Image (cartoon, helix red, strand yellow):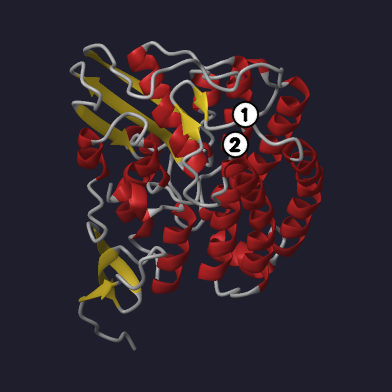
C-alpha cells in the first residue's frame, strides 16, 4: 500500500565555522527524497575584494591566504601573477620553480583533505581522515621551513618569494616526495575497491560534461566528466610548459570519479615536484621590485589551476599603491552552481556525500 507523504522543507546548517558548515542548504524533501535545493551562503561575509582596495599590493597577500585556507600557496600564486602582469614585473627563474613546488604541495595537501572528509561524510570517521592529516602535516612542516607559518603562509611576493628556502628544505622535500606514492597506494587500498564506497559513490551525483562546461565549472569536478581542461596546460604560467605531466580525467562525472581524479592528480603533482627539484637553478629568489608598487593605470587578469579549479584575480589600477578594484574568480563559488541539479532525486544520505565531493571552502565562496 502506498504511503501518502507531503513535501517538507528542512534547513541543513550552518553548524561550524571550520567545515562545510558555514553554509545552509534549504532542502525540500518528499520523505527522504530531495525535491529541490536552495544553497544559502554569506555567513562569513569576508569582504576580501573590498578590503584589498585599502591595502598595498604586498599587504593583500595576507588576504589571499584566507580564501581557500587549505591551499594558501595557490591563492598567493594567482594573486602575485596578476600583480606582476599589471605592474610589468617578472619573477626570476628560481622563484618560479619554488612557486610551482609550493603550489603542487598545496594541491596535494588540499586533495588529501578532500579525500579524508569525503570518507568522513560517508561515515568512516577516523582512519582515512587521520591518514590524510598525517601526510598533510609533513607538507605543512615544509611550509613552516619556508616562512615560519603552516596554514596562512603569505610566502609569495610580487616578483618572487619572501625568502630563499633554507638548505635543509631540499632534502626534506625530496624525502616526502619519495614517500608520498606509497601513502597514496595505502589510501587507495582502503578506499578505491571498498564495496561500501563504491555503492555510495558510483553513479551518484552525476553531472554531464556539457552541463559542467555551461556552468563554467573547472578543476577535478570538470575533469571527472571526461573534459581534459587544465589551466597549467591550456594557458601555461610560470615554468609549467617545461614539465611533463598528465591530466587525469574521469568517465561519467560521478562522486567516485571526482574522488579518483584527485587521487591521480596527487600522483601527477609528485612527478611535477620531482622535475622541479632536478631543474631548479641557482640565482635570485626575488626581483628588485619596490616595496610600494605603483602599477600603471590599466587592468590585468591572471589565473592558476588551483586544487578546486581555475582561481583567478582581476585587478584594476588607477596608478595608486592600492588597486582600484580587485575581483576574484573563486572556483568553490562557481562549482556550487551545479549543486541543485546534482542533488535532486537523491536521498538525504546521498546529499551529504555529493556535497562533500564538491570540496568547497567557504572562505573563497564568501569572499
- The answer for how far apart the CA atoms under marks 1 and 2 are is 6 Å
Please name the residue shown 39% across and 30% down the image.
Answer: 79
Using the image, determine if residue 180 lies above or below residue 80.
below
Residue 31 left/right relative to 112: left
Residue 242 left/right relative to 76: right
- Residue 102 image label: 2
Q: Position of residue 268 (x, y in %)?
A: 68, 35
Cβ–Cβ below 8 Å for labels 1 and 2? yes
Quarter occupied by residue 315: top left
Q: Can the viewer see residue 202?
A: no
Foreground residue, 205 or 118?
118
Please name the residue shown 57% across and 48% down the image.
Answer: 148
Quarter of the image with the N terminus in it: bottom left
Tag 1's secondary structure? helix
Q: Position of residue 182 (x, y in %)?
A: 81, 51
Q: Which residue is mark 1?
A: 98
Please name the residue shown 44% across and 52% down the image.
Answer: 358
Foreground residue, 47 or 331?
47
Amino acid at each position: 500500500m502506498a504511503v501518502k507523504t507531503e513535501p517538507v522543507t528542512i534547513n541543513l546548517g550552518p553548524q561550524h565555522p571550520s567545515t562545510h558548515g558555514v553554509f545552509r542548504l534549504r532542502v525540500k524533501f518528499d520523505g527522504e527524497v530531495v525535491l529541490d535545493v536552495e544553497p544559502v551562503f554569506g555567513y562569513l561575509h569576508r569582504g576580501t575584494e573590498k578590503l584589498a582596495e585599502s591595502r598595498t599590493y604586498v599587504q593583500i597577500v595576507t588576504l589571499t591566504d584566507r580564501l581557500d585556507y587549505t591551499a594558501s600557496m595557490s591563492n598567493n600564486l594567482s594573486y602575485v601573477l596578476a600583480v606582476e602582469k599589471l605592474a610589468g614585473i617578472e619573477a626570476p627563474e628560481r622563484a618560479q620553480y619554488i612557486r610551482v613546488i609550493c603550489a603542487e604541495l598545496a594541491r596535494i595537501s588540499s586533495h588529501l583533505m578532500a579525500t579524508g572528509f569525503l570518507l568522513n561524510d560517508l561515515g568512516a570517521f577516523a582512519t582515512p581522515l587521520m591518514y590524510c592529516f598525517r601526510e598533510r602535516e609533513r607538507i605543512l612542516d615544509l611550509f613552516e621551513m619556508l616562512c615560519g607559518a603552516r596554514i596562512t603562509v603569505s610566502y609569495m611576493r610580487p616578483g618572487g618569494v619572501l625568502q630563499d628556502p633554507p638548505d635543509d628544505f631540499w632534502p626534506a622535500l625530496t624525502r616526502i616526495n619519495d614517500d608520498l606514492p606509497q601513502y597514496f597506494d595505502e589510501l587507495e587500498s582502503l578506499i578505491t575497491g571498498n564495496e561500501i564506497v563504491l555503492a555510495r559513490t558510483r553513479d551518484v551525483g552525476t553531472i554531464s560534461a556539457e552541463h559542467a562546461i555551461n556552468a563554467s565549472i573547472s578543476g577535478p569536478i570538470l575533469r571527472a566528466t571526461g573534459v581534459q581542461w587544465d589551466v597549467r596546460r591550456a594557458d601555461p604560467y610560470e615554468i609549467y610548459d617545461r614539465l611533463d605531466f598528465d591530466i587525469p580525467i574521469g568517465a561519467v562525472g560521478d562522486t567516485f570519479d571526482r574522488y579518483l581524479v584527485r587521487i591521480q592528480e596527487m600522483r601527477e603533482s609528485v612527478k611535477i615536484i620531482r622535475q622541479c627539484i632536478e631543474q631548479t637553478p641557482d640565482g635570485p629568489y626575488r626581483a628588485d621590485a619596490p616595496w610600494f608598487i605603483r602599477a600603471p593605470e590599466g587592468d590585468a587578469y591572471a589565473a592558476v589551476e588551483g586544487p578546486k579549479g581555475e582561481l583567478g584575480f582581476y585587478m584594476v589600477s588607477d596608478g595608486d599603491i592600492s588597486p582600484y578594484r580587485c575581483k576574484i574568480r573563486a572556483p568553490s563559488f562557481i562549482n556550487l552552481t551545479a549543486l541543485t541539479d546534482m542533488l535532486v532525486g537523491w536521498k538525504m544520505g546521498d546529499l551529504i556525500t555529493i556535497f562533500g565531493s564538491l570540496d568547497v571552502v567557504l572562505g573563497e565562496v564568501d569572499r
